[in-house]
Each structure stands twice: as C-alpha cells, then as structure tokens.
Image (spheres, rainbow, N blue to C red):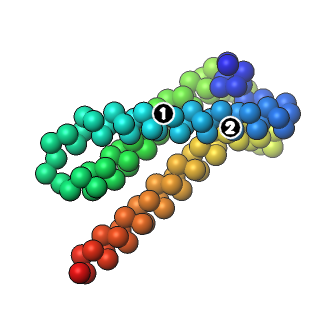
Amino acid sequence: MEYIYFNIDYTTLTTMLVKIVAFTAITALLLYIIYFVLTKTLFRKSSLDRTIALRLTFFWAIFAYLIMFNIYIAVLFYHNGIDSLQWTSPKFYLGIMAQLLVYVGLATLFFVKRHSYKKEIKNNSLN
C-alpha cells in the first residue's frame, strides 16, 4: 500500500495504471463519504430549497477533499524529500500522474458543475 501512495518513482506502465485506478477509486469513495456526511449535518434545517442545498453541499465536499488531498501531497513530498524531486524529468511527472489527474479532474468537475448550475439558475430566473 505504501508503494502505491507514497512512491513517486515511475517503474512501469502497469504500476502507473494501478496508481491511477487506485487514486480514482479512493477519490470517488472519499468524495461520496464527505458528501454524505455533509448532507446529513450541514443543511439539516435549511431554509433553502433542498436541491440547492444538495448542490452547494457537493461544492463543499469537493473543497473539503481538496484540503485533505493537499495535506496528502505535503506529506508525500516531505516523505520523499523535496530536494530529491526531479522537477525537470519526465519520469517524475509519470510517477505523479495519478495525483495530477486527481487535481485536474476535480478542478474540471467543479467548473463544469458550476457552469451548469449557473446556466440553470439563469434559465429559472427568467421565467
């Protein structure tokens, strides 16, 4: 388990794919757990419409997960030593491809959802 989550060395394509699948699965599971906990606690007695509260909770879940993920990245870099990281090597970026995909994926998900919610609010407010 430590090899998957705290090793940034690129060895083979299969290990990179295993890391990507593991990070995607863990991200989805943790995002669901955070979303579930927040829906049960944060907007219990909300005066807002229930659908709006659930959508806002999804944004808070992404925010909370990104905070936890940033702490993980700090521990990862501390564990491997910041001086030993080879920022100019393509193998370094292949080694952290799973972490990069989580960042890009969550940012993309956030902006896509935000755009669709803004579009829906605009359409509903004109009626």
Task: Give how far across and how far down residue 52 sits, in percent.
Answer: 27, 56
Q: In this view, does 94 lie to the left or right of 45?
A: right
Going by the picture, which residue comes out furthest to the bottom? 126
Amino acid under disc 1: Leu
Quadrant of the snapshot with the C terminus: bottom left
| Residue 65 can be seen in this image | no
| Residue 102 can be seen in this image | yes
Q: Mark 1 points at which residue?
A: 30
Give me the residue at 44% from left, 59% from top: 113
Amino acid under disc 2: Val
Q: Name the residue under label 2.
A: 21
Q: In this view, does 127 lie to the left or right of 81?
A: left
Task: Give how far across and how far down residue 39 sits, in percent.
Answer: 30, 40
Give me the residue at 54% from left, 37% from top: 27
Which SS class for mark 2? helix
Quadrant of the snapshot with the N terminus: top right
